Image (tube, rainbow, N blue to C red):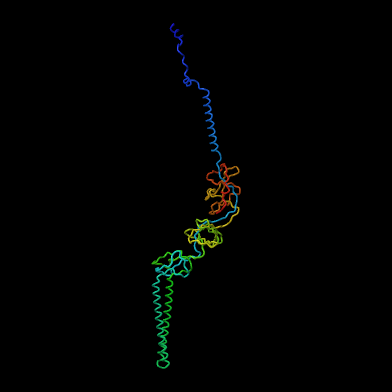
Amino acid sequence: MSNDRNKSNVQPTGPVAAPDVARTGETGPARPERISSKRILLVLAGAISSILVALFAFYRLRPPEAVVQTISPTTIEIALAVVGRARPSDLVEIKSPNAGQIIRVFRDDGDAVAADAPLAIIRSAVEQAQNDADVARAAAARAEATRAKSAFDRTRALAADGFVSRAALDEARAALLSAEAAVAAAVAQTRATAARTGEFTIRAPMAGIVLVRPIDNGQVVSAETTLFQLGSLQGVEIHADVDETYADALQPGMSARASLSGSKSQFTAHVVEVSPRVDATTGGRLVKLAPDTATRIPPGRSIDVTILVATRRNAIVVPRQAVLDATTAPKVLVVDAQDIARARAVKVAAWPSSNAIIEQGLAAGDRVIMLPATIEASTKVRPLEQADGDNASAGE
């Protein structure tokens, strides 16, 4: 027991070691300032998360934007835009009255010719030789007639003196009459041959410009072959093929605006003829227009034409993209007083205009959604009014 008591009373004789601050910090209680920093970070993270969730819910659940146009009736032009081609007011296709071979061509595309100017010769050498032969036969007949006339005159003088009989005089008279008849026949044959020879010299029926020359020297042609296409020097027409569905609305006298394709310069024109015949190939009718003032346009040039069919007052038009199911059951989305998109059936005019002409279903003040494909019907929207400069105002 003495030993145990001695052990318990033993006091350290060396210096007492100070506690390890670093280790005490690891195993001991945390400092108050570090606990406050962690709490602040947790509170901030929670607040930010709440804000983000609230913003996401706000943008996810708020009504979508919808660009709308407030309907305002206006005056529009009902017009038809077509592409036509210029051609001379008088256009002649020249053909040969007889089949044959082209011996010589005098004119080419673009040449200006005078009336009755030679354009080509068809088998001219053969026909001219035949004419020369007929002229020679006519000359021989005239010579024979001259000889018969001299014989008749001598016989008549001898008969007067009683040296020849009456029968000899009658025979001389008959020979003279026969020779004169032969002359007449030969002359008629010459004229006929000359006429045929003239037909084989192809001539211009009027002054104009050669537009097309599809023939060449040595080519054999028939009476149906077009040798030249000749256009008049004065006057221009515009020919356009218009779908029969819309051509029924066109009438002579309607005014039009026209411009050469690719050009901004315009000139006025008017409809002069609407063909009653429908082309079975294209399903269109030929419409002819004439410029109101003299205009030089190269034949065959493409021309953009807008024909003014009618003027409609208090018309309602919207862009075609604002109409849903246009070919089956056309409708639009209209924003009501509670800013809810409502589907409304409309009637669209069957006319090829850039904007849809609404005949029934809309009225002044209605707000129509411009891009209805992005909006569901019966949903609330945030309407954004379209700028006035973007409003549809024309029926072309």
Image location (x, y in percent) of residue 360: 58, 51
Location of residue 156 with respect to 241 vertically, above or below: below
Q: Is residue 104 visible?
A: yes
Q: Nearer the viewer, residue 259 or 20?
A: 20
What residue is rendered at 51% in x and 22% in y?
Answer: 31
Q: Nearer the viewer, residue 353 or 333?
A: 353
Quadrant, the N terminus = top left
Q: Quadrant of residue 78?
A: bottom right
Q: Nearer the viewer, residue 101 or 294?
A: 294
Location of residue 236 with respect to 382 vertically, above or below: below
Image location (x, y in percent) of residue 205: 47, 69
Location of residue 183 with respect to 3 vertically, above or below: below
Q: Is residue 276 visible?
A: no
Number of dots carrying numbers: 0
Image location (x, y in percent) of residue 118: 44, 69
Q: Residue furthest bottom?
A: 162
Q: Nearer the viewer, residue 140 or 225?
A: 140
Q: Residue furthest top?
A: 2
Quadrant, the C terminus = bottom right
Q: Quadrant of residue 167?
A: bottom left
Q: Quadrant of residue 162?
A: bottom left
Image location (x, y in percent) of residue 306: 54, 57
